[in-house]
Image: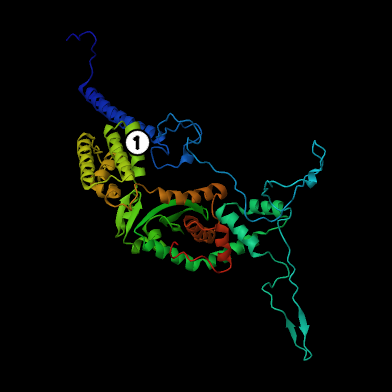
Amino acid sequence: MKIPEGYILVKESDYRALVKRNAELEELLSKCIKRIDELEARLNKTSNNSSKPPSSDGLKKVVKNNREKSNRKPGAQPGHTGSGLSLMKTIDKTIEHKLSGKCDCGKELSKGSIINVEHRQVIDFPEKLTEVRDHQVEVKKCSCGRIHKAVCDYTGRVQYGDRIKTFLIYCNQYQQIPYGRLQEFVGDMFGISISDGLIQSTISDCYENLSETENQIKEALLTSAVIHNDETGMRCENKTGWIHTASNQTHTLYFYHPKRGNEAIDAMGILPFYKGTSIHDRWSSYDKYDCIHGLCNSHLLRDLKFMHEEMNRPWAEELKELLQHANQKKQKGNITKHFRTRIGNQIESIVTKAMRREPRAESIPGKRGRKAKGKALCLLDVFRDRINQVLLFLEKDEVPFDNNLAERDLRMIKLKQKISGCFRTRKGAEYFCRIRSYISTIKKQGRNIMDSLAQALQGKPVNLAYCH
């Protein structure tokens, strides 16, 4: 038999082997393309379109800003009142500048009448920033032979006062200055030497004195209509632990635990007993608790942006615009029941159409169990199954659009990690969480931090049961 030009003769077994091999290569190529798409999408994730922190963006990463450029010039706008230093009412020292000499007419200026005195105040540190108080404790001997000493609160031969100790707590726990740098600063600024032991014992005393205050913060959060919950990783004892937060507009509670999930949340003692509204991200551990749940829409907006820009899903942009429109209406106070129903119906329509078009996960031969859903389907499931939690901010005036309050509270934890790197002991993490809870709550309530820390160090912390 003559073989046509361009063809070759092969055995049937070889042909079948080639067909099988070609199918295997096509399947492998399909998997590789899918994997490459997943890895490229992962590389394109930034803090702007996902929950990654800004520090992970790097120096060369171009971050796309959601803000639109306006025609206004930089700086203060017309009508801005501005602010500046005002004359102080309390004066520590007065320095008079007298006129002397003669006028051009020949008369002595010192004999002229004063028509005005201009005040030019200078606010500065005194030359000596510390004072040494020598407590002379009188000791007397009675005729009967007994020795008597006068009463004095200080027992040591030389010690530092409460103001210096308060300053150490303020610098270390609030301003995040590590021990070494704090010791250098105090030495340069005040000319005194501070040991590690003094800083540690001062922080320990403050921690012990705030035990009841921590319970007050818990009680205030448990009775709050809305609280915000979140958590972040923190290295402690050479392992990754977790600092959890529960907060509202007036109170903040931090809690350290080696675990991230329900064991840690139970130990914190808030959500297991809370019956109000908890705002959080989609971390599944929060769903266990018997309270009203509201989702953080800022997280959803970032995920939708990623889906639209990096995975080319048009429905993501539609959902993003709907959420932003709803938030703008909420800020203007124009929410009606009809508007809430209309937004819900629009989201349902978009999600239904998108789920029909979204490709389903393919079965892998020889692999048992449920087929893994893609990120797009998982995000659509949120809008389908948890739409009431997504739109809870439209139902209740007190419920915010996002969980930014908790994220702002945790920002100081990440700053602590960047400066110090870790906690060497669990006790150090617990010290930091309790004292920082007190400081954050004090700050939210508009109180003076230094004065409040001084009261805590003296065993009389501010009553934080209620916000006055």
Left of 14 or right of it: where is 232? right
Residue at 58% x, 44% y: name it. Answer: 84
* Percent of width and height locating residue 251: 44, 58
Residue at 64% x, 64% y: name it. Answer: 162
Residue placed farthest to the bottom in the image?
A: 144
Left of 82 or right of it: where is 145? right
Whether residue 335 is situated above or below residue 70 in the rendered picture: below
The answer to whether residue 276 of the structure is visible from this angle is yes
Q: Quadrant of the N terminus?
A: top left
* Percent of width and height locating residue 13: 22, 24
Q: Secondary structure at mark 1?
A: helix
For residue 376, what is the image quadrant?
A: top left
Left of 395 or right of it: where is 428? right
The answer to whether residue 372 of the structure is visible from this angle is no
For residue 35, what is the image quadrant?
A: top left
- Circle 1 residue: 305
Please count the marks in the image.
1
Q: Quadrant of the C terminus?
A: bottom left
How many C-alpha atoms fall within 10 Å of the one at disc 1: few (<14), some, or many (≥20)? many
Residue at 32% x, 33% y: name it. Answer: 308
Nearer-the-camera pick, 57 or 424: 57
Whether residue 275 is situated above or below residue 59 in the rendered picture: below
Nearer-the-camera pick, 273 or 162: 162
* Percent of width and height locating residue 405: 41, 50
The amino acid at mark 1 is Lys
For residue 271, what is the image quadrant?
A: bottom left
Nearer-the-camera pick, 386 or 222: 222
